[in-house]
Each structure stands twice: as C-alpha cells, then as structure tokens.
Image (spheres, rainbow, N blue to C red):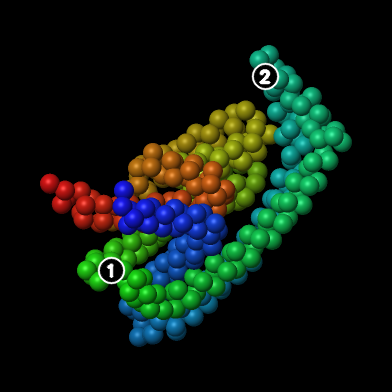
Amino acid sequence: MNGRTLLGAFALLVLGLLTWELRWVLLVLFGAVVLAVALDVPITTVRRLLPLNRPAALVGVLLVLVLVGGLLAQLLLPELLDQFTQLTSLLPALAQRLSSLARQISWLPNLERQLMELGTWDRLQPLGSQLLGFAGGAASTTVQLVLMALLAILLALDPRSHQKVVVALTPGFWRPQMGLLLSECRQALGGWLAGMTLSAVSVFLLTWAGLALLGVPLALLSALVCGLLTFVPTIGPTAATLLPLAVALLVSPAKLVQVLVLRLSLQNAEAFLLTPILLRRTVNLLPTVALTAQLCLGALLGLAGVLLALPLVVVLQVVCEQVVVKELMDRWV
C-alpha cells in the first residue's frame, strides 16, 4: 500500500467523521433543497403563464401560499381546535374502554394496573426531566425549521447560481454530466413532491368525507392526520389509522369495523392506484427500499430522518441510475 492510497483512505475517514459531526447542518440544507424544489414547481408554472422574472414569481407564489394558508386556517382551525379539545377529553374514556377490553382477554396483562403503576411518583419523576428535554428539542427544531425556510427561499430565488457552484466544484471532464444530473434530480424530486402532495390532499378529502358519512367523531382531525402522514409511505398511513379507529371504538365495535374497512380501502387505492398514476413520470420507489431508508434514517436522525428519507432516496436513485449504472456498470466489460 503506497502513500497515495493511505492519504486517500485518511481523507475519506476524515470526510466521513466531518459529515457525521455536521449531519444536522446537512439535514437542514437538504430539507431546504426539498422546500426550494417545492417552491420552484409553482414558480416555473407561473413564469410559463405570465411574463414575470423569478423574484416577482417567487413573491407571488409566497403571497398565494400565505393567503391560501390563512383562508384554510380561518375555515378549519376553529373546528380543529375544538376537535383537539374533544380528543383530550375522550382520552380517559378510551383508556377505560381499552382496560375493559383487556380484562375480557385472559392472555393480555391488566392494562388498568399498568396505567396506575405509571402514575406513581417514582415513575413520574423522570417524566419531568424528559418533558424539559422535549421542550428544549422543540425549540431547537423550531430554529432549524426557520433556517430551513430562509435557505429554501434563497435557493428558490436564484437556483442557477447555486447549480453553477456545484458544477464548478466538479472535475472538468464531468461537468456536462453533472449539469444534466442536477437537472434530472430536480425533475424527479419536483415530480415526486407534486405527486405526493396531490395524493395527500386526496386522502385527506376522501377520509374526511368517509368518516363524516359514517358519523365518526373528530372526522376533520383524523382526516388531517391521515393526509399529513401520507408523506411517510408504508409507516405513515398505518400509524394514522390508529386515531380514527380509537375514536370509532368509543362509539361501537361495528363502527370500528366500518372505519377499518374505509381506511384499508383508501390505503390500497392510494398505494396501488392513485400514487402510481401521479408518479408515473418520475422515479418509482420500491416499498422495500422506502421502508429500509425510513428505518435507517429514523434510527440515525429520529423523526427528521424519517420525514426526509423518501426525498433523499428519490435523489439517490437518480444518482445511482446516472452514475453507478451508466458510468460504471454499463462500461464495465
């Protein structure tokens, strides 16, 4: 092993350690890129329809988003707050219902006894420190989200200059391919974001309508949770179903079965019909790849890793197709 090989291995080791130490900075930066691409999709559409420069189009898109968000908040926020208050008041009844069901099943432990044990002073003392840690984490997350939004606006304001910087850092013989690679990554990520947004809105509206027709309480809150968790495929829809099922259990077992049938129908329609149609022009992620990425990044980075796992996989899949497959494997004869 010569000196150049040792130097290269040492440089890779240092780069890996530096990447790990700066993982949260890189996560915020990648989140900003995702948000910038999400802004770039409507900005490009507006510039095709109207003779506006990019800054004016960006301001127009942001104003529309603020106005639409304010209108939706004015229409839905009072009802959501009311339903959230109802949910907090229903939690004791839900715990009592689950406890009564647990008593009827011999192989289940006594749920009520375990809940009472959790309420002892010895168990509650560590909870205080955990809540303080959670408050500190929430403040740090808020700062990271604000920085992410500011970076996204700056990236969306002048994406070509940032793209030129990335291309300039590439070796000269591969700069044309790097420009094409960045364009394809942007197209794939933009298509994925647009498709998932339409899918989430559809799931929200259909779930809201279905739960309202079934007469299930907290229909709007449950539908909103189901729509938002659509952005976390495989894990999200299953976790979102727990809320309407728990509320339906308080009504009757028959209502729980109806809600379960509704959610299974919508999940299968979204997974096997709606999402493939919306994403037919972009990358098609295998469920195993998506779930593995969510588990790995979730274990390394927590909730933020789970949320950004799928956009990262979309970009990595394009990179693998264009670099690993075409530039390396196809030429390896």
Q: Which residue is drawn at 78% across and 42% down?
A: 127
Instruction: Name the residue that disc number 2 marks.
Output: 108
Q: Which residue is drawn at 71% across and 20% down?
A: 109
Say how many tags the image has: 2
Quadrant housing residue 216: top right
328 left or right of 238 in image: left
Q: Sequence-wise, which precedes: disc 2 or disc 1?
A: 2
Task: Check disc 2: other Cα within 10 Å, few if <14, some if 14-19, many if 20+.
Answer: few
Circle 1: element type: loop
Q: Between residue 131 and residue 14, name the one nearer to us.
A: 14
Q: Three-letter amino acid code at disc 2?
A: Leu
Q: Can residue 71 be seen in this view?
A: no
Q: How far apart are marks 2 and 1 (CA)?
A: 63 Å
Q: Where is residue 241 in the image (x, y as percent from the top left)?
A: 55, 39
Quadrant housing residue 72: bottom right
Q: Residue at x 37, y 48 (%)?
A: 274
Q: Where is residue 205 in the image (x, y as percent from the top left)?
A: 50, 52
Q: Where is residue 155 in the image (x, y as percent from the top left)?
A: 45, 74
Instruction: Name the residue that disc number 1 marks.
Output: 171
Q: Position of residue 116 (x, y in %)?
A: 82, 29
196 left or right of 260 in image: left
Q: Residue at x 54, y 69 (%)?
A: 149
8 left or right of 132 in image: left
The disc placed on residue 210 is none
Q: Three-letter amino acid code at disc 1?
A: Pro
Q: Between residue 189 and residue 104, name the one nearer to us.
A: 189
Task: Check disc 1: other Cα within 10 Å, few if <14, some if 14-19, many if 20+.
Answer: few
Circle 2: element type: loop
Q: Is residue 58 above or below residue 7?
A: below
Q: Is residue 242 above or below residue 7?
A: above
Q: Can residue 88 be seen in this view?
A: yes
Quadrant housing residue 147: bottom right
